[in-house]
C-alpha cells in the first residue's frame, strides 16, 4: 500500500492510523520522496526512492486542495506544485486504465475541489442556497450529498450509518468511479441528515472518520 | 435573453461583450461587482439563479449562457468564496437545464486542461494523432528522448501558461534546485500551426506560419506571422465533435501542427481565449458565437426528437392504377 500524502508525515490522523496498521504501508510526503515519475504513451511509472511501484500496488493519493499546507513561498513553488499535481494526475490516470477493477485509489485536488463535478451523473441536483454570511462551501457539499440520496428516499430514515447510507455511498463509488468517499451524517430525531460529503479526506475530519477510511482502505484490520 | 457571465476587467470577456453589444437581448453579469460586495449572495431554487446584493439580477431557466470566469489566487478569500458559491449554483443550474440547453464554456470543462499528459491520452483515445510525448523526472530517459527526437518541444505539464520552446540536452536542468519538478518533452513536428475554433457545429480554422516556435509570442519577439484560413479535413472534424460531445464542450479551440497530410493535435483549449484569433479572421468566431447564442440551444448535445422510423401517417397508400395496355 502506497500513500502519497501532501501533509507532513504523521501530521494527519489517517496517516497515523495507516502507519499503525499491521499491513505494510509506505507513506510519501507528496513529491519530496518520489524519485522517478514518468508518462510515455499509455505507460506510466512511479518510483519511490529506488523502489518502482508495481502497477498492482494500491495507491492512496491524498492531496488536499492546492496550498492547503504549506503556503507557497514563491512563484516558482506555485508553478512547481501545479506541475507535480498535473504529472501525478497523468501517472495515476494511466494506472487506473490498466487496473479496471479499482485496485488503485485516486484522489486529485481537481476532482476534490468541486463535488458537483463528480455528481453530474446523478441527475438533477437539489436546490442550492448561499446567503451572505453563510458557509457556502458547506452548502455545496450538502447539496452534492443530497443529490446522491435523492434516488433513495426511503433510505433517509435508515438508522445512523445503516445499510441505506451504505447503499447510497456504494452508488456514488460505482457511478463516479471512486474507491470511496465519506458522508458526514447527523441523527436528527430518528432521521439521518447528511451534513457533509468528502470525496477526499480532509485533514480536520474526526479521527473516527479516518479510522473508518483506513478500514475501508484495508490498511487497518 | 442571452446571459454573458464573467469579469468585466478580463480581456476576452470584455471583448465578447463588446462584439455582442449591439444586441438588445443581452444581460451582462459582471462577477467583479458581485464577489466584492459584502452583502451579495446567490440562490438557486432548482430553476433560476438569483443574485442579490447591490446589483440584483436573475438568470432564468432556459436562457442561453456564455460564461468565462476563473478563481484567481490573488483574489481575497471572501471574494473567492462568493465566486465558488456562484460557480456551484451555475453548475447545478446547468445540470437541471438538460443536455440541450446552451452553456458556452461550461464551468466543469476547464478540468480537462489541468494535466497535459492526461489530456493527450484522452485525445489519442478519441483517435487524434498526437506527437510522441515524455513526462519524466528521469534525466537519462529525457536525454534518450532528445536523441530519438532531436530538439524536442518543452512546455509546462499543467494548466499554467508557459511559452513552448525547443530545447537540447544541455538546456535541461533536471534535479537542479531551480527546476525540481517533472519535465514534459514533445516531439517537434515540422510544418505549420492550425488553430481550429469549433463553435457548436461551426468551425473556423486558421493556419499560422512563423519562424518562432510558439506563434503566440512571435510578434513580440520580432518574428512576423502569416495567417490564412484553412478548412480541416472531414475526419478531423468528426474527431473534434466526438471529443466535444464526450467532454460536453460547446466551444473548443484545437491546436494542431500540420505536417504533410498529417494533423497532429498538440492540445485542446476547453475555454478558448479567442479574441486574438477573432481579429485575424474578421470576427468570424464572435459571429459564430453570436449565432449560436441566438439559436439558444446546442446542436451537439440536443436530444433527438425526430422519429427514427417512418410512422403510419407517412406511408400513404400507393395507387398503382391499372396496367397500361397500349
Image: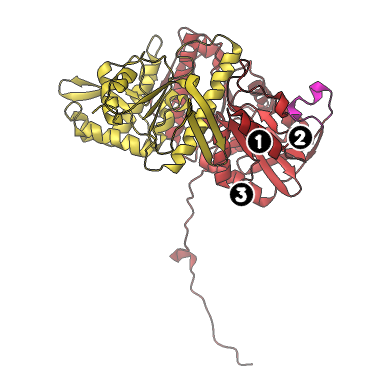
Q: Chain of mark 3?
A: B
Return the x and y of residue B295 as percentages of the image width and height: 59, 39
Q: For the residues carrying marks 3 and 2, which lies nearer the camera in this image?
A: 3
What is the C-alpha distance between the residues marked 1 and 3? 35 Å
Mark 2–mark 1 Cα distance, whole angstroms, equals 41 Å
Q: Nearer the viewer, mark 2 or mark 1?
A: 1
Chain letter, yellow: A
What numbered label is drawn on residue B292?
none
Q: Quadrant of the N terminus of chain B?
A: top right
Give the chain letter at badge 1: B
Q: Residue at left 40%, top 43%?
A: A100
Q: Which residue is mark 1?
A: B144
Please indicate, yes or no, whether residue B108 appears anywhere in the rendered image. no
**How many numbered tags mark residues here?**
3
Q: Which residue is mark 3?
A: B238
The range drawn in magenta is B211-224
Say left or right for B125 vs A69: right
Is any atom of residue B211 visible in this view?
Answer: yes
Image x and y of residue A52, in percent: 47, 33
Q: Which residue is mark 2?
A: B281
Mark 1 surroundings within 10 Å by alpha-carbon count, few (fewer than 14), some (14 through 19), many (20 or more): few
Q: Residue furthest top?
A: B38
As helix, strand or loop, the secondary structure at mark 3 comes to helix
Residue lying at the far bottom of the rendered structure: B326
Chain letter, colour red in render: B
Amino acid at each position: 500500500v502506497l500513500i502519497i500524502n501532501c501533509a507532513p508525515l504523521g501530521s494527519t490522523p489517517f496517516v497515523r492510523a495507516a502507519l499503525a496498521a499491521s499491513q505494510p504501508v509506505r507513506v510519501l510526503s507528496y513529491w519530496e520522496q518520489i524519485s522517478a515519475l514518468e508518462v510515455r504513451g499509455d505507460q506510466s511509472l512511479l518510483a519511490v526512492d529506488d523502489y518502482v511501484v508495481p502497477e498492482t500496488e494500491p495507491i492512496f493519493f491524498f492531496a488536499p486542495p492546492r496550498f492547503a499546507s504549506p503556503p507557497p513561498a514563491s512563484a516558482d513553488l506555485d508553478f512547481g506544485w501545479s506541475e507535480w499535481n498535473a504529472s501525478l494526475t497523468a501517472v495515476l490516470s494511466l494506472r487506473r486504465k490498466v487496473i479496471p477493477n479499482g485496485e488503485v485509489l485516486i484522489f486529485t485536488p481537481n476532482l476534490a475541489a468541486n463535488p458537483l463535478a463528480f455528481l453530474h451523473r446523478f441527475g438533477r441536483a437539489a436546490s442550492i442556497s448561499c446567503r451572505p454570511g453563510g458557509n457556502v462551501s458547506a452548502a455545496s457539499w450538502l447539496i452534492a450529498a443530497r443529490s446522491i440520496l435523492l434516488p433513495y428516499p426511503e433510505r433517509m430514515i435508515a438508522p445512523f450509518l445503516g445499510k441505506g447510507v451504505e447503499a447510497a455511498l456504494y452508488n456514488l463509488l460505482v457511478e463516479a468511479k471512486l474507491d470511496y468517499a465519506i458522508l458526514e451524517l447527523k441523527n436528527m430525531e430518528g432521521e439521518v441528515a447528511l451534513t457533509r460529503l468528502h470525496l477526499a479526506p480532509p485533514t480536520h475530519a474526526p479521527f473516527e472518520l479516518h479510522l473508518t477510511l483506513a478500514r475501508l482502505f484495508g490498511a487497518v484490520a | 435573453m442571452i446571459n454573458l457571465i464573467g469579469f468585466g476587467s478580463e480581456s476576452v470577456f470584455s471583448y465578447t461583450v463588446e462584439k455582442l453589444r449591439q444586441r438588445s437581448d443581452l444581460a451582462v453579469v459582471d462577477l467583479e461587482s458581485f464577489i466584492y460586495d459584502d452583502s451579495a449572495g446567490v440562490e438557486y431554487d432548482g430553476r433560476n439563479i438569483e443574485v442579490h446584493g447591490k446589483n440584483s439580477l436573475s438568470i432564468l431557466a432556459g436562457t442561453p449562457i456564455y460564461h468565462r470566469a476563473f478563481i484567481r489566487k490573488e483574489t481575497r478569500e471572501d471574494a473567492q468564496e462568493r465566486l465558488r458559491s456562484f460557480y456551484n449554483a451555475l453548475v447545478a443550474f446547468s445540470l437541471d437545464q438538460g443536455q440541450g440547453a446552451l452553456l458556452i464554456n461550461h464551468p466543469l470543462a476547464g478540468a480537462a486542461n489541468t494535466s497535459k499528459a492526461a489530456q493527450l491520452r484522452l485525445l489519442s483515445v478519441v483517435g487524434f494523432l498526437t506527437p510522441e510525448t515524455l513526462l519524466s523526472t528521469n534525466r537519462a530517459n529525457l536525454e534518450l528522448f532528445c536523441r530519438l527526437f532531436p530538439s524536442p518541444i518543452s512546455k509546462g505539464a499543467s494548466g499554467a501558461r508557459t511559452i513552448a520552446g525547443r530545447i537540447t540536452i544541455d538546456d535541461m536542468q533536471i534535479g537542479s534546485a531551480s527546476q525540481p519538478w517533472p519535465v514534459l518533452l514533445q516531439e517537434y513536428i515540422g510544418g505549420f500551426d492550425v488553430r481550429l475554433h469549433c463553435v457548436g457545429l461551426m468551425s473556423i480554422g486558421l493556419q499560422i506560419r512563423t519562424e518562432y516556435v510558439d506563434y503566440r509570442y512571435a510578434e513580440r519577439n520580432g518574428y512576423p506571422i502569416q495567417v490564412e484560413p484553412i478548412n480541416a479535413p472531414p475526419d478531423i472534424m468528426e474527431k473534434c465533435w466526438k471529443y466535444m460531445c464526450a467532454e460536453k464542450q460547446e466551444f473548443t479551440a484545437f491546436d494542431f501542427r500540420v505536417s504533410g497530410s498529417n494533423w497532429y493535435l498538440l492540445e485542446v483549449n476547453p475555454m478558448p481565449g479567442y479574441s486574438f484569433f477573432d481579429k485575424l479572421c474578421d470576427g468570424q468566431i464572435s459571429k459564430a458565437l453570436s449565432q449560436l447564442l441566438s439559436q439558444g440551444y446546442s446542436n451537439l448535445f440536443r436530444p433527438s426528437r425526430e422519429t427514427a422510423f417512418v410512422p403510419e401517417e407517412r406511408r400513404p397508400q400507393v395507387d398503382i392504377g391499372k396496367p397500361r395496355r397500349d
